[in-house]
Amino acid sequence: MGRYLLRRVLIMVPTLFAISIATFIIIQLPPGDYVTTLIAQYSAQGDQLDGPQIEALKNRYGVGDPMIVQYWKWISAILFHLDFGESFAWQKPVSSLLADRLPLTIALSIITLLFIWAVSFPIGIYSALRQYSAGDYVFTMIGFIGLATPNFLIALVLMYLGMQYFGTGAGGLFSPEWKDASWNIGKVLDLLGHIWVPLVVWGTAGTAGMIRILRANLLDEIRKPYVTAARARGVSETKLTVKYPLRVALNPFFSTIGWVLASLISADAIVSKVLNLPTMGPLLLDALRSQDMYLAGSIVLISATLTVIGTLISDLLLGWLDPRVRLGAR
Amino acid sequence: MTTIAEPHGAGEPDAPPPPDAPTAPEHGHHSDDAVAVASQWQLTWWSFRKHKLAMIGAIVTLGLYLMVIFAGFLAPYAKNFYSPEYTYAPPQQLHVLDDGRFGLYVHPQSAEQDPSTLQLTWTVDESARTDVGLFVKGDEYRMLGFLTLDRHLIGPVDPDGEPVFLLGADKNGHDILSRIIHGSVVSMTIGLVGVAISLVIAIVLGGLSGLLGGLTDTVIQRVIEFLMSLPAIPLWMALAAAVPPTWNPLERYFAIILILSLIGWTGLAREVRGKFMSVREEEYITAATVDGAGRGRLIFRHMLPQFTSHIIAGLSLSIPSMILAETSLSWLGLGLQAPVVSWGVLLQEAQNIRVITTAPWIMIPGLAVVVAVLALNFFGDGLRDAADPYKN
């Protein structure tokens, strides 16, 4: 297990390096450099930056230096000082902006992941064991429609239905009266009353995909000769399913943590905008609109890194669960 | 074997069986003889036809692409037609029977504005009627690039009278039905063009990877894994935001397609690679190599035809994800922009819940997206199942 872990962590290094290069390119994409933009913004407000300040900024971001030096200045500040640069739209360090929103984004992603598992697990098993039953068709249909509908549309429709028929408020995680309250039971209950909308919206596509995978895997597995052999020996149907095939079919639950996390973070940008959630997505959108590139780049960098970490976790879980993966010849 | 069914006639359910074929094939069931001589495409078609949902998907997909071609004729109005006094006019019910006889009409509606809240209240005038006709004269449009016509499948009989909004109107008084039909041109083709670009990248890189193996394979596979590990939407957003705002709509259209396909080729490339790797080991390839066939001939004559059907299935499954991606990007305001009309651009109107509660019909373009994506998914799923007719 130790060697497996080491190998997996080592593979991450070139990937993270490539991600940082891609992010750096994205930051550099808009014409003009950061300091010029900042000076223009200051003069638009009637302010002036004096010479030494401009020099310090130019030195900080490596304006005029070769690309490699600029890249190094940028990445070393992140690695050694967690300094992601300044957001000129907010006039705050990027790291402080992210500190507000990152925990909620991660927490919501993990809760959604648990929600996806909790829903797709029973449905996937049911669909496989009762293949082509009415229930299987209904779930398959719902799953397909879930995959075919853009996330924001699901969010809008749910909010519309909520407004029309349940009189719930428009998005957000808290009702206005609880927004600034300190944590207590009432606030938690209020949160629970709101959180199901993002969970459902966020989780739909992932749930649909997961049900399909679990169903297909379980179907493959229960047709294998060892299951027939066990059945011939009189093993009960429940035991027959739960003891072996289900364990093998569970692999995708762990192997897909990586891409489910990626797609959750992806969908965040869109869903949170509709639902008005204080996560990273809307921040990214605003940053891109105003070409606030250090903020946007940092969010892309962090999202990609989280995805890589998710993949690592899923590989480790899979290695722990399934010796074939850990000892596989590679 | 005494008699052999004509491979051609056997495939069509309606064609009379050839006189010398004793085993007239029934729907979905073919005699062993017919199966034995049928071409791969024939087998694929037989297998595909059995898949009900896939057939429905195929028909709907075909219908949507016909809609793209005949958009100008099918839409009641031109895409930039608007009447400002019909802001958020609700959908009008089309009456088909006129005193027991066939006759199309709608009741006209008019708005009243509440002076304090500025909210519009629409009332239907049940006593009056606006006649609606088929093949009526209306705005001029060009079809197939050269035909200039002015007939529309459906629309108000009097083009200068009351406008007709069968699916309602948006903020500017555009007819939503017409805009959905015109929007299909961009939305449905963005998938096709994007997939074509992805296909070229996927075949070249996937092919190299599968054929050469070794270091080339490792490098390409690592690149694919890297691209797959990136969260797609933030990356799309970042790249789309970098498209200069000064570009004209056409340039923007191609830039967005390029961005979508630069990330979308990876899955297809994997499939191509896997196929090349398995076909490479087949005996007939060895035979062809021994026979002195060059590499180009090996690839294009012997290998590619072997899995064309798989590639087509893969393609039809990537079109829907492109359509969804375009819709999301445009909705966010980072994709296509008005005056271009696409389903995503139309959905830009549906930004917040307040607008939707006043005029829920502005979400109808979303229905078009769902139908198109579902149809393409079913079609692609069926194709994928049918692509390997020798499986069973």
Image (cartoon, coloured by chain):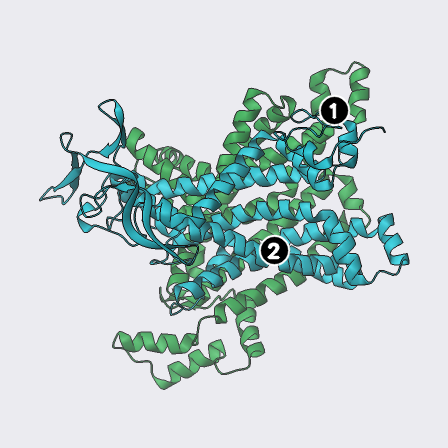
Chain colours: A green, B cyan
Residue, x 46% and y 43% (percent of image)? B64
Residue A299 picture location, percent across and down:
48, 59
The residue tagged 1 is: B23
Q: In the rendered view, would you say B332 is above or below A127?
A: below
Q: Residues within 10 Å of mark 1 (few under 14, many from 20)?
A: some
Q: Is residue B233 left or right of residue A5?
A: left
Please tell me whether mark 1 or mark 2 is closer to you in this view: 1
Q: Residue furthest front?
A: B19
Chain identifier of the residue bearing label 2 in the image: B
User: Is residue A114 at all visible to an observer of this figure?
Assistant: no
Up-down: is B329 above or below A288? Answer: above
Q: Nearer the viewer, residue B175 or A295?
A: B175
Residue farthest toward the top in the current orientation of the protein:
A234
| Disc 2: which residue | B265
Taking A323 as reference, is A204 left or right?
left
Residue B374: % across, % down: 51, 38
Q: Position of residue B336 (x, y in %)?
A: 40, 58
